Image (cartoon, rainbow, N blue to C red):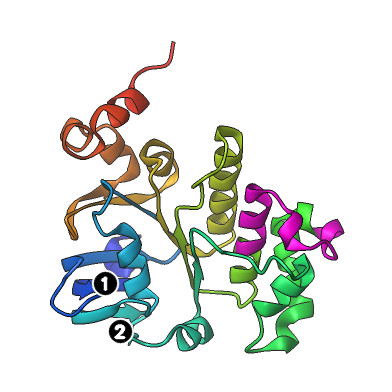
Amino acid sequence: MTENEREIVVDVDTVTAGYLPGVNILTDCSLRAYQGELIGIIGPNGAGKSTLLKAIFGQVHVRSGSVTLAGENITNLRANKLVARGVGFIPQTNNVFPSLTIEENLQMGVFQNPKLFSERVGVVTEIFPDLAGRLKQRAGGLSGGERQMVAMGRALMMDPKVLLLDEPSAGLSPVRQDEAFLRVSEINKAGVTCIMVEQNARRCLQICDRGYVLDQGHDAYTGSGRDLLHDPKVTELYLGTLGAEQNAPRG
């Protein structure tokens, strides 16, 4: 199937956006995600990666350009309306309600349509079987990796068309990071289009279908994850020494 025949789920078209009046974090930034794709967004600190996700999710004001979801203009829509239209968002921090149980966190995921709970909780616990026997446990007592799993599960409760993930491996140990990437892959294989911002560029590019390298609020490079991973210019200019070490052969 050619790109022209594939459904475009998210289309960010030359978006300029920022938090403060007159200060743009993104400038003419574009991104496209097709049905079933896993998109990775990498780049140096301060490049605008998280801002791009927040602009898609209505948390940062888009001053020019547009964001569409399955052909519908969703530019600057409020987050609650975006969730109802099929957009899930998992922030990097404060991503669970610690005083609530796992079950109650999942219920919060369908607060707009509580009747979905019994159906969707089964789907979520099939993807994350570790949650099935712990639904009455309070989220505040979970490890960082377990909280990430709950946050992903809650975002999936509304059966989203697309899932936005802001650095799902941040703050986790190397083993837990690998688990986080596996979970993202499992969600994607279940049919959810995923757009993921990541500082762990090597692992991100290893699992994503296509990647975008952001620099100073603009999409500087794009290509398949494998092509970007082995592109010496991307490594030299945007990943630096860390990128070179990550791409070095392992003996």
* Range shown magenta: 132-151
Asked if 35 appears above or below 70 in the picture, the reply is above
153 relative to 209 in the view: left or right = right
Asked if 90 appears above or below 233 in the picture, the reply is below
Identified by mark 2, the residue type is Thr
Rendered image: mark on residue 12 = 1
Quadrant of the image containing the N terminus: bottom left
The residue to which callout 2 is attached is: 75
User: Relative to the observer, which residue lies in front, 155 or 207?
Assistant: 155
130 relative to 156 in the view: left or right = right
Asked if 156 appears above or below 238 in the picture, the reply is below
Residue 171, x across and y down, in percent: 52, 45
Residue 213 among magenta residues: no
Answer whether labels 1 and 2 touch (C-beta < 8 Å): no
Q: Residue at x 72, y 87 (%)?
A: 114
Residue 195, x across and y down, in percent: 41, 60
Residue 154, x across and y down, in percent: 64, 69
Residue 147 among magenta residues: yes
Q: Residue at x 33, y 20 (%)?
A: 248
User: Relative to the observer, which residue lies in front, 183 or 104?
Assistant: 104
Identified by mark 1, the residue type is Val
Q: Residue at x 49, y 64 (%)?
A: 91
